[in-house]
Amino acid sequence: MSASPRSDPSMWDAVHADPSVPLDRAVVSQIIDDQRRLSRRWLYPVVRILSRVAIALVSIVKRVLPFRWMPLAMMDWLCVWFLRRGVSPDAVDLLLRHFVIETNLVNFIIRNTPVDMEPVTLRPTTLAGLGDQAVVEHDVNVYDVLIALDHVDLTRPEQLDFAQLDIPALDAERGRRRLFRLDIQTALCLMNIPFAMALTVEEYRRAVHSIRFDDSFLEILSLVCDDTTFRHWKMGGMSLWMDSNVDVPQMVYRHALVCEYAHAHLVKLARGAYPRDTDVAFD
């Protein structure tokens, strides 16, 4: 009697099929494709270390020379140019998508709590939309809504307002000729360097610390929606932990995934489950 053949499953097929992931399967496929880029396998481990060393050196010198080394407009121009010429369109699409999704989450909280604050408007659909200090505004919106929630009773309203949970059409300039097509994590490591150079020490620290509010947002969404599902994605990132000596690009990547999960669950609460077309092979 012959032995049955040993199973040899694909990690990527399992990740794509994982029923616990609440995302649209097209988005999951896009994330997997980005993770499978050669730059993610070969460049990212090296660039990640070099980026951390560069940021540490910039931080040390900036404490001695505490002025803005680079205009914010120059930082915007460099990052947009780099995204146009050196980053894959799928990675750019994921980055644009994150800006829209985080704004959707912030506005959901504003609309469903009695805060004295107008909905924010940062929903870039093009690379040009990432200019004009969009990265700084992106972080400031998080602080503004948290401060506005001070002394607010966080309970589920009688009727949840699910307005503006859409993702508009995004233009990653797929037709543009690129010198490189880097994955999103390698790109984040490189973009973090001009970001640290352009911001003051306190501005950079504020930007890094904004990621520690992920657990706070998940708790707020859990209370407002009266749904404990949001708490499943917490990582114990307490906002009172004041440590900026961290792997920022790695934290940003996880932050983007947390926002994707939370946004997907809101869409599920509003309209039902996302489609799950799993007829995709990655071998």
Image (spheres, rainbow, N blue to C red):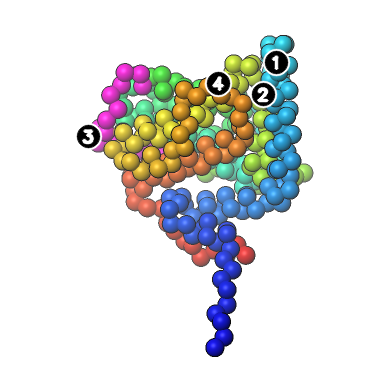
Out of 245 and 180, give the one closest to the viewer.
Answer: 245
Check disc 2 and report its element: helix, strand or loop.
Answer: helix
Q: x, y percentage for residue 236?
A: 45, 34
Query: Considering only order in the chain, which callout, 2 or 1, is on the residue closer to the N terminus?
Result: 1
Q: Which residue is mark 1?
A: 62
Is the residue under label 2 in contact with that under label 1 (CB below 8 Å)? yes
Gap in angstroms between the C-alphas marked 1 and 4? 15 Å
Contact (Cβ within 8 Å) of mark 1 with mark 4: no
Vertical side of 230 occupied by 55: above or below:
above
Q: Place residue 245 in its image quadrant.
A: top right
Mark 2 residue type: Ala
- Residue drawn at x 66%, y 26% as measured from the top left: 195
Query: Mark 3 or 2, which is nearer the eye?
Result: 2
User: Which range of residues does the magenta coloring cover?
Assistant: 149-167
Label 1 – label 2 distance at C-alpha? 10 Å
Q: Is the residue under label 2 in contact with that under label 3 (CB below 8 Å)?
A: no
**Residue at numbered disc 3:** 158
First-in-chain label (1 vs 4)? 1
In space, the residues marked 2 and 4 are separated at their CA atoms by 11 Å
Q: Are marks 1 and 3 in contact (CB under 8 Å)?
A: no
Q: Which residue is mark 2?
A: 196
Q: Secondary structure at mark 4?
A: helix
- Whole-angstrom CA distance, mark 1 to mark 3, is 50 Å
Residue at x-position 71% and y-position 18%: 60
Between tags 1 and 2, which lies in front?
Answer: 1
Mark positioned earlier in the residue sequence (2 or 4): 2
- Give the label on residue 206, or none: 4
Query: Left or right: 117 with respect to 70?
Result: left
Q: Is residue 92 above or below residue 213?
A: below
For image coordinates 74% across by 34% down, the residue present is: 50
